[in-house]
Image (cartoon, rainbow, N blue to C red):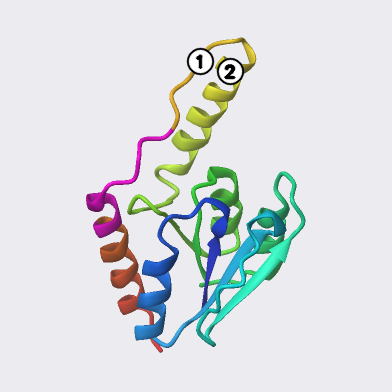
């Protein structure tokens, strides 16, 4: 089991890496070359760079993930695809994507896209709070504890 991070806009990378280290889990950080960094990561963290472009990181994550992997993403489409592969998929605000919520989230995303195409302004996502980070860490902790190693 590996933990994959859709990293171009993921604000909880450090939290994921800290917990993964405690559980001796490998982390794969997938991001575009436009976010290249010379910062060194621990040995258990692999960084995979992809070309800049829509869905390039998503396609790489889909290529690399296997059943029971954990994926961290805010992309509802990627979340749905990873769920179909049998992955556990988490949002950085501290909730897990499930069959009970993914259809609603995809419908809301589509409605927002249609509104923007029609010239309407829509609100962006709310800023990440300390409470969101705490919820995320608690959820990831619980999931890592639930896996049989």
Residue at the spot 55% in from the left edge and 73% down from the top edge: 39
Determine which quarter of the picture holds residue 148. Answer: bottom left
Picture coordinates of residue 113, whole percent (x, y): 59, 24
Q: Vertically, is 87 above or below 22? A: above
Q: Which residue is mark 2?
A: 116
Using the image, tell me which numbered label, if any, was put on residue 121. Answer: 1
Please, what secondary structure does the residue beneath circle 1 have? loop
In magenta segment, residue 129: yes
**Nearest the eye: 112 or 81:** 112
- Quadrant location, the C terminus: bottom left
**Left or right: 40 as drawn, with respect to 145:** right
Residue at the (51%, 54%) spot, across then down: 73
Circle 1 packing at 10 Å, graded few (<14), some (14-19), many (20+), is: few
Determine whether the residue tagged by mark 2 lies in a helix, strand or loop. helix
Specify the segment rendered in magenta.
Answer: 125-134
Magenta stretch: includes residue 29 = no
The answer to the question of whether label 1 and label 2 lie on touching residues, with beta carbons closer than 8 A, is yes
x, y percentage for residue 103? 49, 38
Which quadrant would residue 120 be assigned to in this image? top right
């Amino acid at each position: 089991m590996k933990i994959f991070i859709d990293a171009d806009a993921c604000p909880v990378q450090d939290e994921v890496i800290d917990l993964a280290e405690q559980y001796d889990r490998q982390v794969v950080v997938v991001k575009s070359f436009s976010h290249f960094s010379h910062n060194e990561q621990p040995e258990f963290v692999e960084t995979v760079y992809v070309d800049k472009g829509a869905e390039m990181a998503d396609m790489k994550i889909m290529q690399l993930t296997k059943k029971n992997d954990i994926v961290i993403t805010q992309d509802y489409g990627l979340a749905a695809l990873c769920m179909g592969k049998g992955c556990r998929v988490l949002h950085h605000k501290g909730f897990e994507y499930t069959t009970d919520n993914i259809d609603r989230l995809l419908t809301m995303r589509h409605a927002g896209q249609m509104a923007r195409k029609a010239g309407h302004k829509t609100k962006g996502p709310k800023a990440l709070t300390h409470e969101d980070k705490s919820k995320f860490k608690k959820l990831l902790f619980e999931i890592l504890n639930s896996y049989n190693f």
